[in-house]
């Protein structure tokens, strides 16, 4: 579904991503793990049209999407939940969800209502708080909303940047359970996480990013069994 080859990104003279290649097959959950500053967010921003790569190519279902504007990439079925959630704080929960379906809303307001109900079933907490301004939600609730808003566009590929960040263990479990449910329902997912063990546990394959380059890749179950990998690259004890 997604094919990335030789992707490099610079910020000024600083190299944030160097010759990164990876792929995500339809139906897979693929994790990108790595320490702070490894380039994980930069990678996702380059894939979703938010930063311009210096070199390399991104293909989605055989179509080049490198350098397309972000809204075009959303239109092609890629939805991105950015790091730090970024919900529209002065809008209500329900308005945030409706905004997530901005491409459907003119064609079929009825479909948008159905999608909102689907998200309320997924996260009943959002239904309880449907009229509350998103900026006043707790961190965990905002993460649920950010994920639901991304799902409102019925993406083929969901891209998640550190969905666990700043959440209590209970919320983290809830979010990771939701990722497993989405996988079962056939959504393809690319997830970036600092909680490496958790990300390896829920993914089919993983890439380890170090200083902007992929230093290791493989089946997540194989990487999980390798103590050396966990200690060396992921700082797990
Ligand atoms: N807009 C920017 N301008 C300049 N440098 C940037 C910018 N965004 C990121 N960087 C730098 O690029 C490198 C990679 O950052 P990035 O945010 O991709 O890392 P990350 O792996 O997502 O880290 P974290 O786990 O802390 O979120 C870092 O050294 C960072 O300081
Ligand atoms: Mg990041």
Image (cartoon, rainbow, N blue to C red):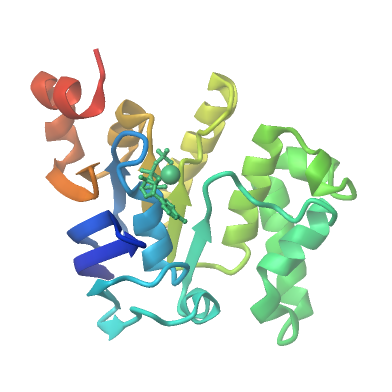
Residue 26 in view: no
Left-right relation of 163 to 47: right
The residue that appears at 74% across and 33% down in the rendered structure is 138
Residue 59 to residue 201: above or below: below
Residue 165 to residue 183: above or below: above
How many labels, in total? Answer: 0
Left-right relation of 152 to 22: right
Residue 171 to residue 94: above or below: above
List x then y, in percent, for residue 120.
Answer: 72, 49
The residue that appears at 38% across and 80% down in the rendered structure is 67
List x then y, in percent, for residue 235.
Answer: 25, 21
Quadrant of the snapshot with the C terminus: top left
Quadrant of the snapshot with the N terminus: bottom left
The residue that appears at 30% across and 85% down in the rendered structure is 63
Q: Nearer the viewer, residue 149 or 209?
A: 209
Pick out the residue farthest to the right.
131
List x then y, in percent, for residue 81.
Answer: 53, 54
Residue 198 in view: yes
Q: Nearer the viewer, residue 163 or 205?
A: 163
The residue that appears at 65% across and 58% down in the rendered structure is 149
Q: Nearer the viewer, residue 222 or 11?
A: 11
List x then y, in percent, for residue 18.
Answer: 20, 58
Pick out the residue farthest to the front.
13
Left-right relation of 152 to 2: right
Pick out the residue farthest to the top.
237
């Amino acid at each position: 579904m997604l094919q990335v080859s030789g992707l490099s990104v610079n910020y000024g003279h600083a190299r944030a991503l160097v010759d990164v290649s990876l792929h995500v097959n339809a139906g897979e959950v693929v994790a990108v793990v790595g320490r702070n500053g490894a380039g994980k967010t930069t990678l996702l921003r380059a894939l979703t049209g938010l930063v311009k790569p210096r070199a390399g190519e991104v293909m989605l279902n055989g179509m080049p999407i490198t350098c397309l504007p972000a809204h075009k990439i959303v239109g092609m079925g890629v939805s991105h939940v950015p790091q730090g959630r970024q919900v529209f704080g002065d809008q209500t929960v329900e308005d945030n969800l409706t905004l997530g379906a901005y491409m459907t809303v003119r064609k079929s307001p009825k479909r948008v209502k159905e999608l909102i109900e689907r998200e309320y079933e997924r996260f009943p907490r959002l239904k309880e708080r449907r009229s509350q301004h998103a900026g006043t939600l707790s961190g965990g609730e905002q993460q649920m909303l950010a994920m639901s808003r991304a799902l409102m566009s019925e993406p083929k590929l969901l891209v998640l940047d550190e969905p666990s960040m700043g959440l209590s263990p209970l919320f983290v479990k809830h979010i990771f359970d939701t990722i497993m449910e989405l996988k079962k329902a056939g959504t393809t997912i690319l997830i970036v996480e600092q909680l490496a063990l958790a990300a390896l546990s829920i993914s089919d394959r993983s890439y380890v990013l170090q200083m902007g380059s992929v230093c290791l890749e493989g089946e997540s179950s194989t990487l999980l069994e390798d103590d050396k990998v966990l200690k060396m690259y992921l700082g797990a004890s």
